[in-house]
Image (cartoon, helix red, strand yellow):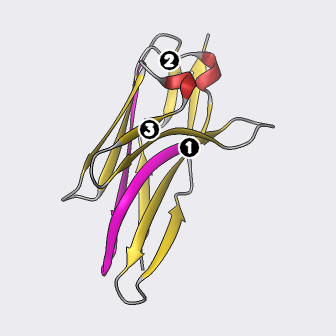
Amino acid sequence: QVQLVESGGGLVQAGGSLRLSCAASGSSFSTFAMGWYRQAPGEQRELVATVSSGDGTNYGDSVKGRFTISSDHAKKTVYLQMNNMKPEDTGTYYCNLKFVDWETAKHSELWGQGTLVTVSS
């Protein structure tokens, strides 16, 4: 069974930095993309950033130039470095894993439980 463990959320002042981590564990799967999405109260979940197994990256417009996503393929871990944070970055950040299950050969998707990020003004 594939599992995700998120860490790194918390409270930070505007202009500050936080780093999120998400590690995938389990057997018999291959990762083809990992990333972060966020959801503010009363809002829809939105893309923050994703990274593919080939290290291609994609960012939401609101975080470009401030956030950086990276991954350690051997550890099946993705990191999100968030700099120059703004109050509008506040929300619950969810890790997302897209993978192929070796046993079924099916493409699947898994979400983490979410980690809360609060940016105070």
**Residue named by callout 2:** 85
Element at label 3: strand
- How packed is label 2: few (under 14 Cα within 10 Å), some, or many (20 or more)? many
At label 1, counting other C-alpha atoms closer than 10 Å, the crowd grade (few under 14, some 14-19, many 20 or more) is some
Write down the region rendered in magenta. Answer: 17-37
User: In the visual, does 82 lie left or right of 63?
Assistant: left
Q: Main secondary structure of the magenta part?
A: strand
Report the Cα–Cα distance between label 2 and label 1: 16 Å
Q: Can you identify the residue that label 3 sits on? A: 58
- Residue 55, labelled with which disc? none
Viewer-side label of 1, 3: 3
| In contact (CB < 8 Å): disc 3 and disc 2 | no
- Who's the residue at 64% across and 21% down the image? 88
> Which residue is at a point 42% across and 58% down the rendered structure image?
5
* Residue that mark 1 sits on: 37
Task: Name the spot of residue 107 as percent of width and height, x first.
Answer: 47, 74
Instruction: Look at the image and say whether residue 31 sits in the magenta stretch.
Output: yes
User: Which callout, 3 or 2, points to the residue nearer the camera?
Assistant: 3
